[in-house]
Image: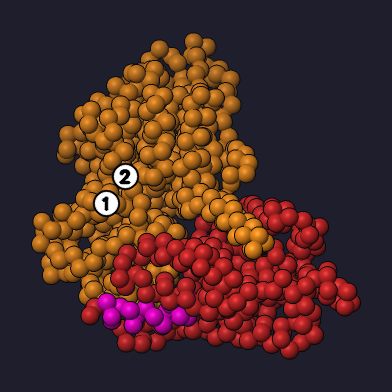
Amino acid sequence: MQQIGLLLASLPDGILLGFVYGLAAMGLTLIWGVMNVINLSHGPIIALGMFGTFYLFTRLGLNPYAGLIPVAIVGLLLGILIYAVAVHRVINAPHLSSLLATFSVNMIIIGLGTAAFTTSPYNVDFAAGSFKLGSTTLLGTRLIAALVAMLFTGGLYLFLFRTRPGKYIRAVTNNRSAAELMGIPSTRILALSFGLGTMLAAVSGALIATFFPFSILAGGSYELKSFVIGVLGGLGNPVGALFGGLVLGLLEGIIPAFMESSWVPVIEFGLFVIILLVRPSGLFGAKQQ
Amino acid sequence: MKRSLSSILTLLVMLGVILSACAPSAPTQAPVAPALTEAPVEEPVEEQPAATEAPAMTEETITIGFTSSLTGAQEVSSKRQVTGFNLWMDQVNEAGGIKLSDGTVVKIAAQTYDDESAKERVQELYTRLITEDNADFLISPYSSGLAAAASIIAEQNGKIMITAGAAEDDAYKTGNTSLFQLYTPGSQYLLSTVDMLKRLDPEAKIAVVHENDKFSTSVVEGLKPYLESEGFEVVLEEGYASETTDFGPIINKIVESGATVLLGGGHYPDGSTFARQLYERKAGLKFVSLLVAPADSKFPELGDAAIGISTSSQWELAATHTQEEADALGKPWYGPTGEEFAAAYEAATGEKPTYHVAGGYMTGLVLQKAIEDADSVDPEKVKAALEAMDIFTFYGGIKFDTSPETHGLQIGHLMVVAQWQKDDAGELVRKVIWPADVANADPLYPVPAPE
């Protein structure tokens, strides 16, 4: 009985967190889906989003939610830069090359970040109120973060399916050579896609910073979750990523009710392996070759 | 078919690369190039020309080796420990060095590296300190986990290692001969807190929620039997991973269990996050005691979330030990007073010292005393002096267990309970609330609920 109570108490939190996980994962799966590149610098970019919010909040007094806009813009530009410098040349090379390229970017960002910020924990001391729901307390920051995540998901979906650049992105995803033959500037589209992916990562970092402490190394765990979500939800599909995020968020809320919370990663990654074996294209279908 | 198979294989290889690179115990993801970074903070003191007064004085420089966590999970507390040690080293060198009876003057040089809060780095670097840098004496890194890794290397090479920030008991039960612990052992950390709770609220329902690491586990191993013997009801016991940032599920569990008192935590990052989220989620506990984090001077950054949070402390300036105490116990007094130490530290850094700083300082002070007692820097003589030591300092009693089974365990030192309270000016101050004879404030019990 205690466990049911605990379950109900943990569910809302899990769901709200799941939306943010989904947003973080969207950044990774978009890039992965569009150009078959696994962005190993995904984690540090999430962390940079966290630091962006922190500095905007503490130095300029900017509300973290208003600060999402500059963080998103910088995330987009950073992604385009990373694409141009590190990824473009190895886009057609075997997977390992792009993996190493983004891994190097990862190490560079972490190195610079450690030198600039050290690794002691930072916090964005922003409170958005809370309200009681039964025996649990729901935090305003998490609620707003979930709403923002939903907004971004909707925005991304509309962008991909209702705008011309979005259509180009889907065309390039589907078949790059054919798209090029149709006159689509694939390099620019790839750069834009990469930028969109990093933008989503940065924004999710900005949201996470409002409720968890962080350092330049904090992005790593979200990057790992993004991989699991990518496989759960299918690549390149924003709704799939959101769904995958919700599944993960729910697991993180439910599992501690029945066993020690240290089982959570075991079950998360166990699920990851099972999905890979049973349905490698993800629960929401595959990107087409 | 072939294409998807190769995709899966690539995925798994990639995952293997990432998981090995992102393993929680090595936060800097560095299997690539373990380049040694010499810590910018310390610089080996150059041998200075001997003072002009006594041409008979010969100078000798001993090298003290250690690693500090300039990055990673232990950064905050490790830096405090190192700053404490550096203060001692600077004071000794400025005073001319440790003077021995044969006219030798011993100066101190430090050799240190960044261990990145990673056990693997600790092992590599301590090996380097011993074999390449020829350190004469070693000091442990901060944290029981890292110190345990370092003690293996120290013991293998027969080098004396004085440990600070390393409370876990088990490291001293491996049949060692060269370890000397300064901190009160982990198993005793929360015993005086339980004594205090017995006085304040014997009906309290206790939740024990701790980090899953060596130190916190050793604290809980000592705590649980004592709670039982004192008749307390433990309604929840759980461990959490060191990297945990989301304490929501755990806090829900605590609330659901009906607990009124929380004992636990771990180190600074998780402890401070735990305290913050307890406040945000209005957990409504009557009393919270967390390990390590509340003892750090960064803790007030939590603002109102810090009010009422208590910790077990190895030393507090407000309850610093005195020569009178030493005389009453019949022990020899050694070293500066707590106020002198704090003044010197504040002059050097602008901050008040915490017990991590004191621990670092004591590693040097204890070594100095041992060298003076041994009247030599010969490791065997210094070891004998350490084993015979039974002194009283501003930090408290220092006496090492010399039995072969538990060599080096600290048996002379007691802890106090401290709590963050608002003083009359509305500032957050850490007060000593137990034991009653050294307390400078009453315990805040129950902790006021957040508005």
Q: Chain of mark 2?
A: B
According to the rendering, which colour does chain A have? red
Tell me which residue sits at (74%, 75%) in the image.
A174
Looking at the rendered structure, the secondary structure element under dot 2 is: loop
Q: Chain of mark 1?
A: B
In the rendered image, residue A14 lying in the magenta stretch gets the answer: yes
Is the image coloured rainbow, by chain, by secondary structure, or in one colour?
by chain
Which one is in front, B385 or B90? B385
Quarter holding residue A216:
bottom right
Q: Which residues are magenta?
A: A3-27
Q: Which chain is orange?
A: B
Q: Quadrant of the N terminus of chain B?
A: bottom right
On the picture, is A26 further left or further right than B405?
right
In the rendered image, residue B7 lying in the magenta stretch gets the answer: no
Looking at the rendered structure, the secondary structure element under dot 1 is: helix
Which one is in front, B380 or B339? B380
On the picture, is B180 further left or further right than B236?
right
* Rendering coords of residue B3 (x, y %): 67, 61
* Rendering coords of residue B81 (x, y %): 43, 44
* Rendering coords of residue B440 (x, y %): 26, 59
Which one is in front, B309 or B185? B185
Mark 2 surroundings: few (<14), some (14-19) or many (≥20) residues within 10 A: many
Could you tell me what secondary structure mostly forms the magenta stretch? helix
Instruction: Give the residue at mark 2.
Output: B167
Instruction: Give the residue at mark 1.
Output: B219
Quarter holding residue A61:
bottom right
Q: Is residue A101 above or below residue A64?
A: above
Q: Amino acid at mark 2?
A: Ala
* Rendering coords of residue A91 (x, y %): 77, 60
